[in-house]
Image (cartoon, helix red, strand yellow):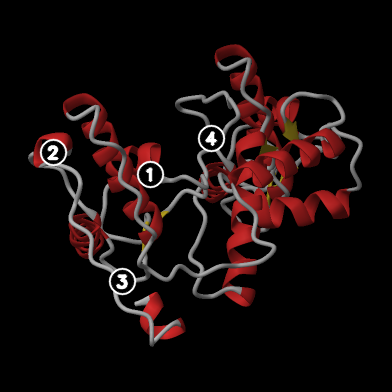
Amino acid sequence: MWRAEYCPDFPEVYCDCPFTYDDVTECEGAWYCDDILAISVEIMEYYDTNNDGTISLEDDIDPEHLEEINMYCDYNENGVTDACEVHACIVMIENDWRDEYCPDYGHLYCDCPFVVSECEGAWDCEDIYNISVETLNYYDTNYDGSINLEDAIESEHYEILVEYCDYNNDGTIDACEVHQCIVDCENAWRDEYCPDYGYIYCDCPFYTATCDGAWNCDDIYYISVDIINYYDTNYDGTINLEDEIDPEHLAEINEYCDYNGDGQVDSCEVHQCIVDIENEWRDEYCPDSEHVYCDCPF
């Protein structure tokens, strides 16, 4: 072909193969690039149920199965496996098979036949981890693994962080919530600047204490409402002697919940009293769990 293009007047060359078939290693059952392509297409058609070119939690797949796929095939560690990663993963599996069953046959090399979207400036899971660490180092001034009002933070700034990052609504932002918040920020950025690139999914790399039976701010709100509805019989927003309550019972409630010492307990004092009870319970039964912080909703 080269002679035909560059030396058309020069005769073609003909050479017999100097090798015998006995000299060429064979490997029965080996896959080739066409096989890898076909297998990759089948895998994507099966798992990529939303047809976005990736296998992710947006597809009809259980998290455990996705985690196993990502363990072997998510080469850029962004929490999803795109078509080229599937293809490269099948190539890797084939070459592992050749190493075991046909060690003299050589590895297979196939370029990815798929087009994968790119997104300049996108963060991967390592970036998100590093940003999370920087965020915690800056805001978590008492080094308890969370951001709350016990840190040296302005209340306005704290409220903004809670609005976007306090997923369990307990008034404090733990390390995993910081991490998830950065993930959500990254995915919101991708929606705007790289809508075809797909979302990133990153498991929380931090340890966060859990506490079975703990109340969050929603629980505390509903408990407060129940208490107010029960004791505030004249519906004036306070519990006092004008309600249908005996003085001894009111005195007990005032002892724990009358923070301003005016002889009655208003809705916000009831709410704060439940917060304090919850935090005392956490101190006793879940000492590694953070305190709950809830603004008065009344």
How far apart are the two marked residues, 2 and 3, measured between alpha carbons? 38 Å
Observer-side mark, 2 or 4, equals 2
Q: CA distance from mark 4 to mark 1?
A: 40 Å
Mark 3, Cα crowd under 10 Å, few <14 / some 14-19 / many 20+, is: few
| As drawn, 291 above or below 285 | below
Residue hosting label 3: 51
The amino acid sitting under disc 3 is: Asn
For marks 2 and 3 on the same chain, the one whose residue lies earlier in the sequence? 2
The answer to the question of whether label 2 and label 3 lie on touching residues, with beta carbons closer than 8 A, is no
Q: Amino acid at mark 1?
A: Cys
Q: Give the mark nearer the N terminus: 4 vs 1.
A: 1
The residue under label 4 is 215
- Horizontally, residue 225 falls left or right of residue 82, namely right
Alpha carbon distance from label 2 to label 1: 28 Å
Instruction: Say which element carries label 2.
Output: loop
Rendered location of residue 239, percent (x, y): 67, 44
State the image coordinates of residue 140 (x, y, percent, origin top left): 81, 33
The residue at the point 68 percent across, 46 percent down is: 127
**Mark 2 against mark 1, which lies toward the viewer?**
2
User: Residue 205's image quarter?
Assistant: top right
Dot 2 amino acid type: Glu
Q: How many marks?
A: 4
- Residue for badge 2: 26
Amino acid beneath label 4 = Trp
Distance from the alpha carbon under mark 3 to that under mark 4: 40 Å
Q: CA distance from mark 1 to mark 3?
A: 18 Å
Q: Is residue 282 above or below residue 239?
A: above
Crowding near the residue tagged with mark 1, few <14, some 14–19, many ≥20 C-alpha atoms within 10 Å: many
Kindly indicate the quadrant of the structure image that contains residue 147: top right
